[in-house]
Image (cartoon, rainbow, N blue to C red):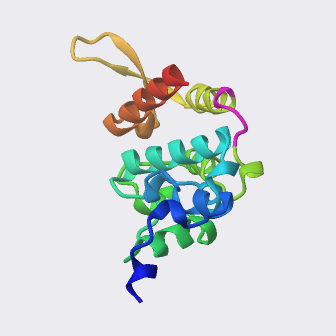
Amino acid sequence: NTEAATLPVSAIEISTAERSALLTMGTIDFMSPEQARDSSTADARSDIYSLGCTFYFLLTGRPVFDGATTLDRVIAHASRPAPELHEVCTQSTDGAETKFLHRMIAKSPGDRFATMDEVIAAIDQLVSDTPKKSVLSGNGTPQTTSHLNLLTSTRWSIAAMALLVCITVL
């Protein structure tokens, strides 16, 4: 029957939930589990999840989860634990950075930072907790440097700039 196959889209009834499922927006590698399930439930914590995935990508050069298909990656975001940062990052890291990123990309929105202000405060804490040592510069004058290579690396600087852009846009 060719009539059924040629019905205009406007003649087909689609519920709001079905329409929401069809119109999920975002990049799978950076999408929170709740946004993938139902984008109408996403809030600021979903954005924090996406930013955490962005930081992870900038620091490691790869997405948090990989998979052969889009569905594999969606399922991984919802169910697989994120890899430990020190297992995939070429920069030296300690537990504080991993804890910070894992809180940003926690599966449950309630386990994430609630606001960008909390994310910024956590970054400030990471920076202030960084051990310092004095070294001599090329001209013999003392300079203070950080033991934490990650915070001074190019990738971390790019991630910090991305955060500032996001804060400005929000």
Number of callouts: 0
| Residue for point 49% across, 50% down | 53
In the image, the segment drawn in magenta is 113-117
| Residue for point 56% across, 72% down | 75
* Coordinates of residue 124 in the picture (x, y in percent): 60, 25
* Coordinates of residue 170 in the picture (x, y in percent): 56, 25
Dividing the picture into quadrants, the one containing residue 119 is top right
| Residue for point 66% across, 47% down | 42
73 over 160 or under it: above or below: below
Position of 23 with respect to 37 (left or right) is left
The answer to if 43 sits in the magenta stretch is no
Dividing the picture into quadrants, the one containing residue 45 is top right
Residue 86 appears in view: yes
* Coordinates of residue 121 in the picture (x, y in percent): 66, 27
* Coordinates of residue 133 in the picture (x, y in percent): 47, 26
Position of 75 with respect to 114 (left or right) is left
64 over 161 or under it: above or below: below
Q: Quadrant of the N terminus?
A: bottom left
Question: In the orientation shown, which residue stands out farthest toward the right?
Answer: 110
Q: Nearer the viewer, residue 110 or 134?
A: 110
Q: Nearer the viewer, residue 102 or 147?
A: 102
Magenta: main secondary structure: loop
| Residue for point 58% across, 47% down | 49
Dividing the picture into quadrants, the one containing residue 17 is bottom right
Residue 83 appears in view: no
Position of 136 with respect to 47 (left or right) is left
Question: In the orientation shown, which residue stands out farthest toward the left?
Answer: 138
54 over 78 or under it: above or below: above
